[in-house]
Amino acid sequence: MEILNIEGAEDTPKIILDRTNGIFEISGRSLPEDSAEFYKPVLEWLKSYSGKSNDSTDFVFKLEYFNTASSKLILDVLSSLESIGGTTIQWYHHEDDEDMQEAGQEFSELVEIPFEFKTY
């Protein structure tokens, strides 16, 4: 599988999806003008990956901020991960960012995937 590597910018997160090296990460700020279009290649990559996934998938979210439109697409990403066995979500947040911690907890209640909450 091709590696999906999207460089982050001021309004878009850095995304690395690398099956071979076991790196699955979305980090930074997510405020793209068109969230659906921005996350489309991620959802397509995950759909392809679900057919030939690794035994375990540790998916890292290390977001500083995301807007409402992005939250829907993040939920879509999480929902697509539900069909991939052995997936764990590593939800990182700044130790003093209660909003991001709460957002992760809310997402964890909406999908059937184990979440691990970590601070940095």
Image (tube, rainbow, N blue to C red):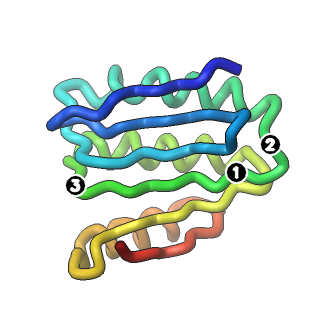
Question: Are the residues flagged by discs 2 and 3 in contact, CB closer than 8 Å?
Answer: no
Residue 107 is left or right of residue 56, and the answer is: left
Circle on res. 57? 1
SS state under label 2: loop
**Which residue is disc 3 drawn over?**
65
Residue 71 is left or right of residue 92, and the answer is: left
SS state under label 1: strand
Label 2 vs 3, first from the N-terminus: 2
Residue 24 point in image, percent of width and height: 57, 44
Question: What residue is at 38 percent from the left and 76 percent from the top?
Answer: 119
Q: For the view shown, which residue lies furthest in the front direction?
A: 21
Question: What residue is at 36 percent from the left and 48 percent from the top?
Answer: 27
Residue 89 sits above or below residue 29 on the image: below
Residues at marks 2 and 3, CA–CA distance in whole angstroms? 29 Å
Q: Quadrant of residue 114?
A: bottom right
Residue 87 sits above or below residue 29 on the image: below
**Which residue is disc 2 drawn over?**
54
Q: Is residue 39 or residue 24 the one in the foreground?
A: 24
Question: What residue is at 65 percent from the left and 28 percent from the top?
Answer: 47
